[in-house]
Image (cartoon, grey):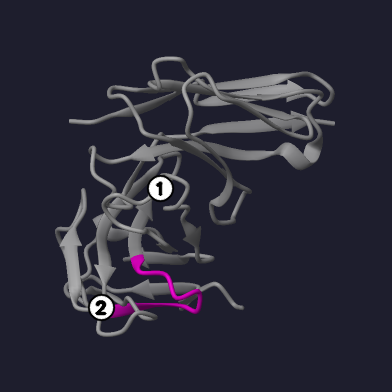
């Protein structure tokens, strides 16, 4: 199993350009997440998905969009890149049994990250 | 809103010294998870604690979950250069089992050989 795969690993964008960060997982996890990590900071949740066709905003969703057409894929779209979006982006997935399930789940598995610079 | 704070933010130790990082939540947590991120790497799951007062060990690492389930600690005995990295604690957001986690800002450990 490859786990969580992110592409590209690095990208430089000009202000106003758009791009899609790809994320795919082969663990049949129902939950997927996008985080951004700024230098010396923790992880901020951008968007998450509890299953195909279902997405919701996290803590810092402005400037981003997501879709989840399949269980495996959860791309993150930047429509008009801004310097404030310079960051490292991590995709993660987890298995959640849902309401009533045990707490021994929801362990998140992360991809290797995409390092994005907007100049 | 819900917050998870970690202290210290940075710690420099001599190889062989012990290290402890503390995690404090503004709310009671159903469980707490710990992750390690090596420099330039991605977060990797270490452990999950579920029970009040729970203590778990992984070789030189000891994890504790407080009695009130609002704080946790990670203690490393006799640090090695392989322990270098940032350690994050994380707890579930809200009371429902949504899968979302709130992460502390992390403690970055540097080990001098």
Q: Are marks 1 and 2 in contact (CB under 8 Å)?
A: no
Height in image: A66 above or below A106?
Answer: below
Locate the N terminus of chain A and report the quarter of the image it occupies.
bottom right
Kindly indicate the quadrant of the structure image that contains residue A88: bottom left
Residue nearest the viewer, comparing A43 with B96: B96
Q: What is the magenta range? A: A19-31
Q: Is residue A31 left or right of residue A66?
A: right
Residue at mark 1 = A102
Residue A64 shows in this picture? no
Q: How many marks?
A: 2
- Residue count near mark 1 (Cα–Cα under 10 Å), binned few <14, some 14–19, many ≥20: few
The alpha-carbon separation of the residues under discs 1 and 2 comes to 22 Å
The percent coordinates of residue B100 (x first, y second) are: 31, 50
At 45% from the left and 39% from the top, the residue drawn is A40
Q: Secondary structure at mark 2?
A: loop
A93 or B97: nearer the viewer: B97
Depth-wise, is mark 1 or mark 2 nearer the camera?
Answer: 1
* Percent of width and height locating residue B60: 78, 30
Which residue position is annotated with label 2? A52
Can see residue A29?
yes
């Amino acid at each position: 199993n490859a786990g969580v795969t992110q592409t590209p690993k690095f990208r430089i964008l000009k202000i106003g350009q758009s791009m899609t960060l790809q994320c795919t997982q082969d663990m049949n996890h129902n939950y997927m997440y996008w985080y951004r990590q700024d230098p010396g900071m923790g992880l901020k949740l951008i968007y998450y998905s509890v299953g195909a066709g279902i997405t919701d905003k996290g803590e810092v969703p402005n400037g981003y969009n997501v879709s989840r057409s399949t269980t495996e894929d959860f791309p993150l779209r930047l429509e008009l890149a801004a310097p404030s979006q310079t960051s490292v982006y991590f995709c993660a997935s987890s298995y959640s049994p849902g309401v009533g399930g045990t707490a021994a789940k929801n362990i998140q598995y992360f991809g290797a990250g995409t390092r994005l610079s907007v100049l | 809103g819900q917050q998870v704070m970690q202290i210290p933010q940075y710690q420099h130790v001599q190889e062989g010294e012990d290290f402890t990082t503390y995690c404090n939540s503004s709310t009671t947590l159903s469980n707490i998870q710990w992750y390690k991120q090596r420099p330039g790497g991605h977060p990797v799951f270490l452990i999950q604690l579920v029970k009040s007062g729970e203590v778990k060990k992984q070789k030189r690492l000891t994890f504790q979950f407080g009695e009130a389930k609002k704080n946790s600690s990670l203690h490393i005995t006799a640090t090695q250069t392989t322990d270098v990295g940032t350690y994050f604690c994380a707890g579930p957001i809200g009371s429902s089992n949504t899968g979302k986690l709130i992460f502390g800002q992390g403690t970055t450990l540097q080990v001098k050989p």
